[in-house]
Image (spheres, helix red, strand yellow):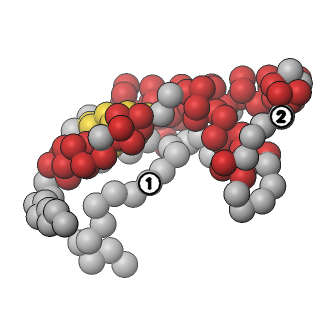
């Protein structure tokens, strides 16, 4: 039960749903009446990160190195093709169909200057930010 404390709900849109990727199916998965924060990461880095998450084993897999031989494999090329399509669909669906306020935040900007971008994000969410610097 939401007691009015939820600021954000993370979703990957329709990208994780089993569907045919046609426009109507994607449109029906997007609620255009919700204010949206679209966190976009460089697609090449996003693909590599996701590959590590789903293909590598171990708790430290997000920092693991992918063997160079993997990059030349057909399996990797197919993975990149599929995931790039999903990345593009997620971004485009929100950009095209959100009718309420939309805040686009680039992951690389957030990691380069987190305090600045978190303040902007909290302002978009209409949250009062009381920062105590130690």
On-image quarter of the C terminus: bottom left
Horizontal side of residue 118 vs 112, given as left or right: left
User: Could you say where residue 77 lies in the image, as x and y percent from the top left?
Assistant: 80, 23
Using the numbered discs, state the Cα–Cα distance from disc 2 to disc 1 in whole angstroms.
31 Å
* 2 or 1: tag closer to the N-terminus: 1
Q: Residue at x 19, y 49 (%)?
A: 119
On-image quarter of the N terminus: bottom left
Task: Provide the secondary structure element on which disc 2 rests.
Answer: loop
User: Could you say where residue 42 lies in the image, as x and y percent from the top left?
Assistant: 50, 28
Q: Kindly identify which residue carries mark 1.
A: 10
Q: Kindly identify which residue carries mark 2.
A: 67
Above or below residue 77? Residue 6 is: below
Horizontal side of residue 97 vs 58, given as left or right: left
Viewer-nearest residue: 68 or 52: 68
Task: Provide the secondary structure element on which disc 1 rests.
Answer: loop
Above or below residue 8? Residue 21 is: above
Viewer-nearest residue: 76 or 13: 76
User: Could you say where residue 41 lies in the image, as x and y percent from the top left?
Assistant: 48, 33
Marking on residue 54: none
Q: Residue at x 24, y 72 (%)?
A: 4
User: Could you say where residue 129 lies in the image, as x and y percent from the top left?
Assistant: 13, 60
Circle 1 crowding by C-alpha within 10 Å: few under 14, some 14–19, many from 20: few
Circle 2 crowding by C-alpha within 10 Å: few under 14, some 14–19, many from 20: few
Horizontal side of residue 27 vs 57, given as left or right: left
């Amino acid at each position: 039960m939401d007691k009015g404390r939820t600021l954000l709900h993370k979703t990957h849109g329709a990208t994780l749903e089993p569907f045919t990727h046609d426009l109507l199916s994607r449109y029906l998965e997007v609620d255009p009446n919700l204010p949206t924060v679209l966190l976009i990461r460089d697609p090449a880095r996003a693909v590599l990160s996701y590959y590590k998450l789903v293909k590598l084993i171990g708790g430290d897999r997000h920092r693991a190195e992918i063997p160079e031989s993997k990059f030349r494999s057909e399996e990797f090329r197919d993975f990149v093709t599929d995931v790039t399509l999903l990345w593009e669909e997620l971004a485009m669906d929100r950009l095209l169909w959100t009718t309420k306020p939309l805040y686009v935040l680039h992951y690389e900007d957030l990691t380069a200057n987190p305090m600045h971008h978190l303040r902007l994000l909290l302002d978009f969410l209409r949250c009062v930010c009381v920062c105590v610097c130690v």
